[in-house]
Amino acid sequence: MDSTPIIQEAVKVLRDGGVILYPTDTVWGIGCDATNEQAVARVFDIKRRSETKSLVLLACDLDMVAKYIKEIPSIAIDLVEVNDAPMTIIYPGAQYLAPNAVAADGSVGIRIPLADEAAQPGKLTAGAFCRELVRRLRRPLVSTSANISGEPTPASFAEISEEIKSAVDYVVPKPFGAGASGRSSQIIKLGLGGEVEILRP
């Protein structure tokens, strides 16, 4: 399946303030433009989740991260360069993002999806798909699991509820690429003074 028209349609929906259901490098997720406050509010509504709970964002590379973080701790560069598994880094000092996409302490969790090679030539993995989607959107993308808050995270597309599927504006076709891996990401919180806190190994 050619990913180009899928990515083009998803980007159009996102730029229009819509919400999409898509495979990430970890699980199937609900996403929107992380700079659009109304779109982020819709994500919270769809999940029935309190806006006091922070969201994870996806970026295509560290250059994009640098645009939305006032100062990247130097250790973050090393972590990203050696990373070989899904890893979300919580950075201090978020900027230029929707206020409801940022935690109360001004931090934000951002993951750069791994672009592993697909098993079949000509197909993108979910991670590579996400990176290309974010690159074309040119803004960070909200990435939160495709479930109602408090319910189990779906391990596959088949486990996503019809309520979630019908609430979004665009669903990335299920057969696309290699699909979501089903892996949870490691979560690491960094401070500007070199502090490192592992929240989820």
Image (cartoon, rainbow, N blue to C red):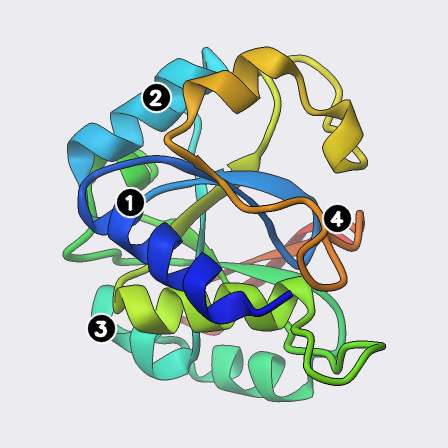
| Frontmost residue, 79 versus 10 | 10
Q: Which mark is residue 184?
A: 4
Nearer the viewer's eye, disc 1 or disc 3?
A: 1
Question: Counting residues from the N terminus, which is met first, the one under dot 2 or under dot 1?
Answer: 1
Q: Position of residue 47 (x, y in %)?
A: 48, 18
| Three-letter code, disc 3 | Lys
Q: Are marks 4 and 2 in contact (CB under 8 Å)?
A: no
Residue of label 1: 13
- Label 4 SS: loop
Secondary structure at badge 2 equals loop
Q: Is residue 31 left or right of residue 150?
A: left
Hey, what amino acid is under mark 4?
Ser
Q: Position of residue 163 (x, y in %)?
A: 55, 11
Query: Mark 1: which secondary structure?
Result: helix
Q: Which residue is mark 2?
A: 51
User: Does residue 76 lie above or below 49 as drawn?
Assistant: below
In space, the residues marked 4 and 2 are separated at their CA atoms by 22 Å
Q: Determine whether the residue tagged by mark 3 lies in a helix, strand or loop.
A: helix
Which one is earlier in the sequence, the residue at label 4 or at label 1?
1
Amino acid type at image mark 2: Glu
Question: Mark 4 or mark 1: which is in front?
Answer: 1
User: What x and y, as percent, mark residue 81?
Assistant: 60, 88
**Residue on which the image places disc 3:** 67
Tell me which label, 3 or 2, sits earlier in the chain: 2
Disc 4 versus disc 3: distance between alpha carbons? Answer: 26 Å
Residue found 52% across the figure and 81% down from its top: 75
Q: Earlier in the sequence, mark 4 or mark 2?
A: 2
